[in-house]
Image (cartoon, rainbow, N blue to C red):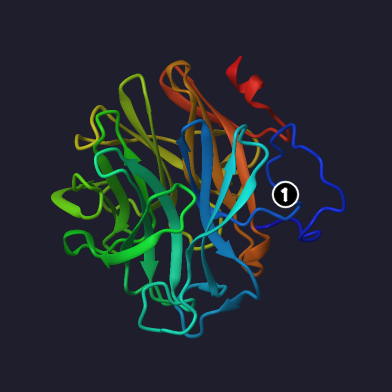
Amino acid sequence: MMLCLNTGYAQTSLTKNTSFKPGENWYDESGHIINAHGGGLFFYNGTYYWYGEIKKGKTSRVPDASWENYRVVAGGVSCYSSKDLLNWKYEGVALPAEKTDSANDLYQGNVIERPKVIYNARTKKFVMWLHIDSKDYAAAKSGVAVSDKPQGPFTYLHSERPNGNMARDMTIYQDDDGRAYHFYSSEENATMHICLLSDDYLSHTTNDKRILINLSREAPAIFKYNNRYYLITSGCTGWAPNEASYAVADSIMGDWTQNGNPCKGADANKTFYAQSTYVLPVDAAKGKFIFMADRWHKTNLEDSRYIWLPLTMNNNVPEISWTDSWTIDELKK
């Protein structure tokens, strides 16, 4: 899915980022390319935290796979912090991979994907959920880890199949009332599920709902606007780009209605050669959000890029259009 090659791992000179430039190399404050793929954002005490998959090293294809299962050695989960969403400080490895124990969920030969972090005000713990899988994607589990600090380190607890269901691509949504929900692709990715998490966010309740039944959607990214819930997903085409769609519900555990593509303009039918991972509210009351996506480079995953674009609500319909360069101030207008 990549259209350009990596130009290096560090800048020769450090300059402040002043605008978002989707698809270009994005450097942290130390001059190194940000490595946080399939990521999620978390806002806490005036600071944004960006968690993502560490993809570093040679890309190889898993032999005998029925699809283009390209992989790198799993590096765990990285964490970056920022005050302005443009300039990011590397906070380190929030959740490291296991290098020697092949029976460990976090073994570097396994799959560690799509980390999302929320805060539990009752337990005062930062909770990370992520997709945990075997290299052939047969395990299909969700893992959970906790920390006393947003930047980690996180302590890994366990993995599970929610109520016995397969669980792959996922996100976590924390509602205004403090309840947290796990959205995950299930049933061989044919149907998505939503499951209410326990009060401490460390396990699943039996309140589990099937949505988008037999529509084969993945890469969920959820947001709330005007008391309704919106869910952007992608189709299931491996590393190849496809057309995004969005679904709407009046309540999380209510009925979800599938709608069309929120992307507009050239390359909208390929989601601008990217795949959704998160939607960040900027001014939710006015319908202003940031759509976060990954532009995967399947044969060189380390060189995958970030596509962050303005998402605006127009008559209760989300719209995402390509722009080569933009700022938060422009989005807020």
Residue 130 in picture, x, y percent from top left: 38, 58
In the image, 74 versus 309, the foreground residue is 74
Q: Is residue 162 visible?
A: yes
Residue 183 in picture, x, y percent from top left: 31, 48
Q: Is residue 261 visible?
A: no
- Residue 178 vertical placement versus 103 (above, below): above
Q: Quadrant of residue 329?
A: top right
Q: Residue furthest right?
A: 12
What number of labels is visible? 1
Quadrant position of the N terminus in the picture: bottom right
- Residue 281 vertical placement versus 234 (above, below): above
In the image, 30 versus 143, the foreground residue is 30
Q: Is residue 214 left or right of residue 318?
A: left
Residue 114 in picture, x, y percent from top left: 45, 56
In the image, 261 versus 293, the foreground residue is 293
Going 57% across and 73% down the picture, which residue do you hit?
72
In the image, 76 versus 297, the foreground residue is 76
Circle 1: is it few (<14), some (14-19), or many (20+) Cα within 10 Å? many
- Pointer 1 residue: 27
Identify residue type, mark 1: Tyr
Q: Is residue 173 left or right of residue 45?
A: left
- For mark 1, give the secondary structure: loop
Quadrant position of the C terminus in the picture: top right
Going 25% across and 27% down the picture, which residue do you hit?
250
